[in-house]
Image (cartoon, rainbow, N blue to C red):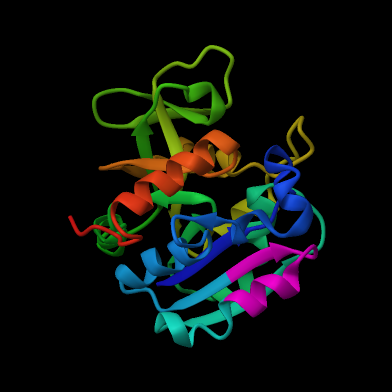
Amino acid sequence: MKGIILAGGLGSRLYPLTRATNKHLLPVGREPMLYHPIRQLVSAGIYDILTITSTDHMGDVVQCLGSGEDFDCKLTYKVQEEAGGIAHALALAEDYAGSDQICVMLGDNIFEYSIEPYVTAFRNQKKGARVLIKEVGDPERYGVAAMDEKHILDIEEKPANPKSSFAVVGLYFYGHEVFDIIKNIEISERGELEITTVNNFYIQKGLLEYSICHGRWTDAGTFESLFEASKILLENDNRILPH
């Protein structure tokens, strides 16, 4: 399995901090934000990792992370020339991924506990995709999963009236077929290729499984959530807790 970290975007909600650097290089706890997804992937036994970021501050990202030697992994880089959504960024990884399973992390998502159990669950999954969900107090900020007792029935992106309190967080697992799916989805009203559209395709085929996220989680895309992310990691000395 290969790891893919998506670290593009303008970080407009964190302006003016992001005037100086990529959002994903801002400090979380005692380290740059991007250290966390790399350490998470390595903790789960994934050592071949692609980081996709925008042209702005690309050099800063490479200078910060280097070859991956400091993390005991191999890092590769790819540039997303223009913002086009999560699925658009993921499509750039097709040649890199080859026929391998992939674990996709959004670079601003901070998890208190290791993602290893979710990686293991997908390694043992014969086909399809897997997402991670978490009960939150503000589901309207996220893709929201409508569910029955066993399955996700539908995912709605940032709904005004959420059908549940379960958000789909920024950790996704796919087989190589995901790239063909992305090629056939339509651009959303927001002008993006949405990862929610990709996940709903898997739902329609009965091929989407899920895990529930244990422990604390946050994205670090606002000043408030950036503070929460730092709080989580500082309390644990920037360590990822084992399950």
Q: Is residue 197 magenta?
A: no
- Residue stretch rendered in magenta on the structure: 51-64
Q: Quadrant of the N terminus?
A: bottom left
Give percent across and percent down for residue 235. 30, 50
Q: Is residue 207 visible?
A: no
The mark tally for this picture is: 0
Give percent across and percent down for residue 156. 54, 26
Q: Would you place residue 71 above or below residue 6 in this image?
A: below
For the residue pair 156 and 136, the one nearer the viewer reads as 136
Q: Residue at x 39, y 40 (%)?
A: 206
Q: Is residue 60 magenta?
A: yes
Q: Residue at x 45, y 52 (%)?
A: 172
Q: Residue at x 45, y 68 (%)?
A: 38
Q: Would you place residue 183 above or below residue 192 in this image?
A: below
* Residue extending furthest toward the left: 243
For the residue pair 18 and 89, the one nearer the viewer reads as 18
Q: Would you place residue 187 above or below residue 121 in this image?
A: above
Q: Is residue 188 visible?
A: yes
Give percent across and percent down for residue 208. 39, 43
Apparent side of residue 211 relative to residue 156 in the rendered image (left or right): left
Q: Would you place residue 240 above or below residue 65 in this image?
A: above
Give percent across and percent down for residue 237. 31, 59
Q: Quadrant of the C terminus?
A: bottom left
Q: Residue at x 35, y 35 (%)?
A: 134
